[in-house]
Image: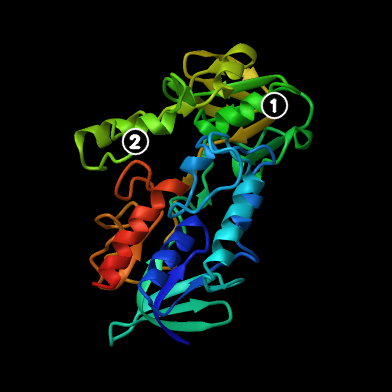
């Protein structure tokens, strides 16, 4: 099967890319490893709520149903993405996990899934910014119950007793706030926590980001470099955490059922949730020069040094909002213009 463009990944980045290509009348398809659109959102924890309001959670200005200033739950995001895909008649082939991407002698790309081979002139990798759950190798498996935050669903899943959440980003804070209602919770942070409210003087925080041009900060700019090091916690969950959760320093090690922290005495817990983020995994891309020694894509605003190969949905791809639903549309438009001059 041969196409002008193949988009690998059917999440918000892949759908935004498909919309931009359709406007350019390109022959393309989207390969999605899941069974349906929005499935990766559906698999997240039950109470997940976006910290961006609905009017800042839209692809290409496509209306997100509900109160514009409200914050959608994960299942609303699933429904929104499905509606966007159907309304714009975007071609998605499901259950197509790409296991290898190579480039032939004629410079066309070969995309291989478990049961199909595709040939294309252009490839847009839209698998997102993060892939494999990361748990640091600082534990000896002596804690009876340990999971990564990607496996967390709700408090009923967590055994009785003290629970430690390692990682104080937005996910760790949200889970800590929820679990504090049913469990005794400890939270380990590796750096100072900075919080921003979701509304300031009656306006959305993201309205201020737009007004002050923070959402458009480029990754290589002084402002962009500053913001990348100081990503804040957004919303009111941190208020709950400060009141009901014991906040400790960085975890140094877990040995014989004891948690050793920087700057405090050891603790014992029954459970650990590792909210420690994800690692990139592009090992399936079998083309030299695509990633650096750390496994991260080599690109400029999503455009690689390999003719015809692009990325979309990366964190700080071209600006602060690139990995958010409302920020990916501009990147999709830019890449579509490169593919179709």
Please report whichever mark, 2 or 1, sits nearer to the chain's N-terminal start. 1
Q: Nearer the viewer, residue 191 or 83?
A: 83
**Residue 295 visible in rendering:** no
**Residue 123 visible in rendering:** yes
Residue 212 in percent (x, y) is at 29, 30
Residue 327 in percent (x, y) is at 39, 47
Q: Residue, x 36% and y 60% (percent of image)? A: 332
Q: Quadrant of the C terminus?
A: bottom left
- The label on residue 161 is none
Number of numbered tags placed on the structure image: 2
User: Badges 2 and 1: C-beta atoms under 8 Å apart?
Assistant: no
User: At numbered mark 1, what does the secondary structure look like: helix, strand or loop?
Assistant: helix
Q: Is residue 129 above or below residue 165?
A: below
Way the structure is coloured = rainbow
Q: Residue, x 24% and y 32% (percent of image)? A: 223
Q: Residue, x 63% and y 45% (percent of image)? A: 74
Q: Is residue 108 above or below residue 282?
A: below
- The label on residue 179 is 1
Tell me the residue that label 2 is attached to: 210
Residue 314 in percent (x, y) is at 38, 52
Residue 318 is left or right of residue 207, and the answer is: left
Q: Quadrant of residue 87?
A: bottom right
């Amino acid at each position: 099967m041969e196409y002008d463009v193949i988009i690998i990944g059917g999440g918000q980045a892949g759908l935004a890319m498909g919309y931009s290509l359709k406007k350019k009348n390109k022959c393309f398809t989207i390969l999605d490893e899941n069974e349906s659109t929005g499935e990766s959102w559906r698999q997240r924890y039950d109470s997940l709520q976006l910290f961006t309001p609905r009017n800042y959670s839209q692809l290409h200005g496509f209306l997100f149903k509900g109160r514009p200033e409200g914050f959608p739950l994960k299942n609303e995001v699933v429904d929104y993405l499905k509606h966007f895909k159907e309304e714009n008649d975007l071609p998605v082939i499901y259950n197509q996990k790409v296991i290898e991407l190579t480039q032939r002698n004629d410079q066309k790309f070969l995309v291989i899934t478990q049961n199909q081979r595709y040939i294309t002139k252009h490839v847009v990798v839209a698998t997102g910014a993060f892939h494999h759950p990361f748990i640091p190798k600082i534990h000896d498996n002596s804690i009876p119950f340990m999971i990564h935050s990607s496996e967390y669903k709700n408090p009923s899943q967590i055994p009785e007793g003290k629970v430690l959440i390692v990682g104080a980003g937005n996910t760790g804070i949200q889970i800590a706030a929820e679990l504090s209602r049913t469990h005794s919770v400890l939270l380990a942070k590796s750096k100072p926590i900075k919080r921003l409210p979701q509304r300031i003087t009656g306006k959305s925080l993201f309205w201020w980001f737009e007004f002050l041009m923070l959402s458009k900060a480029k990754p290589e700019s002084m402002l962009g470099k500053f913001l990348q090091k100081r990503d804040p916690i957004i919303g009111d969950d941190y208020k709950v955490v400060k009141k009901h959760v014991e906040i400790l320093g960085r975890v140094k090690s877990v040995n014989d059922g004891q948690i050793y922290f920087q700057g405090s005495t050891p603790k014992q817990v029954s459970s650990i949730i590792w909210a420690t983020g994800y690692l990139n995994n592009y090992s399936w891309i079998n083309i030299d020069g695509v990633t650096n020694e750390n496994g991260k894509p080599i690109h400029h605003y999503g455009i690689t040094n390999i003719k015809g190969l692009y990325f979309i949905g990366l964190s700080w791809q071209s600006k602060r909002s690139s990995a958010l639903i409302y920020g990916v549309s501009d990147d999709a438009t830019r890449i579509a213009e490169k593919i179709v001059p």
